[in-house]
């Protein structure tokens, strides 16, 4: 039961962090989703956007959180 409790705490912390990021994201010196390294190609009638740097950052943060949660 202890591992279930820790998992719920980690999930709650991640949800809270995402909520704070969404709430105060406009005040940050960088825009999440518009980081250097994100690919943006504007055509005449279309736009292609691939958030490469943002995806890597989110993956790194989630990996760190899950690693900290499963250290035991």
Image (cartoon, grey):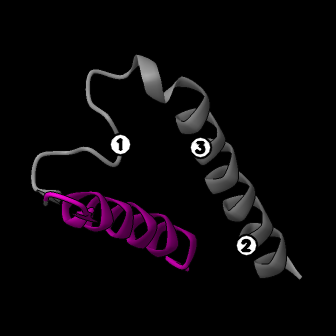
Decide: marks 3, 2 in contact (CB < 8 A)?
no
| Picture residue at 38% right of the left edge, 60% below the top | 61
- Near mark 1 (Cα within 10 A), the count class, few <14, some 14-19 or many ≥20, is some
The location of residue 37, given as percent across then percent down, is 10, 55
Task: Specify the segment rendered in magenta.
Answer: 44-72
Q: Which mark is residue 17?
A: 3
Mark 2–mark 1 Cα distance, whole angstroms, equals: 26 Å
Apparent side of residue 24 relative to residue 11 in the rendered image (left or right): left
Q: Residue at point 57% right, 37% down?
A: 22
Numbered-mark total: 3
Q: Nearer the viewer, mark 3 or mark 2?
A: 3
Relative to 38, is 58 on the left or the right?
right
The residue pinned by badge 2 equals 7
Quadrant of res 56: bottom left
Mark 1 or mark 3: name the one nearer the start of the chain. Answer: 3
Residue underneath mark 1: 32
């Amino acid at each position: 039961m202890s591992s279930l409790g820790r998992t719920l705490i980690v999930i709650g912390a991640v949800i809270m962090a995402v909520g704070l990021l969404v709430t105060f994201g406009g005040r940050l010196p960088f825009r999440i989703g518009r980081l250097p390294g994100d690919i943006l190609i504007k055509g005449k009638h279309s736009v292609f956007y691939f958030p490469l740097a943002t995806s890597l950052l989110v993956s790194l943060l989630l990996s760190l959180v899950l690693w900290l949660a499963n250290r035991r």
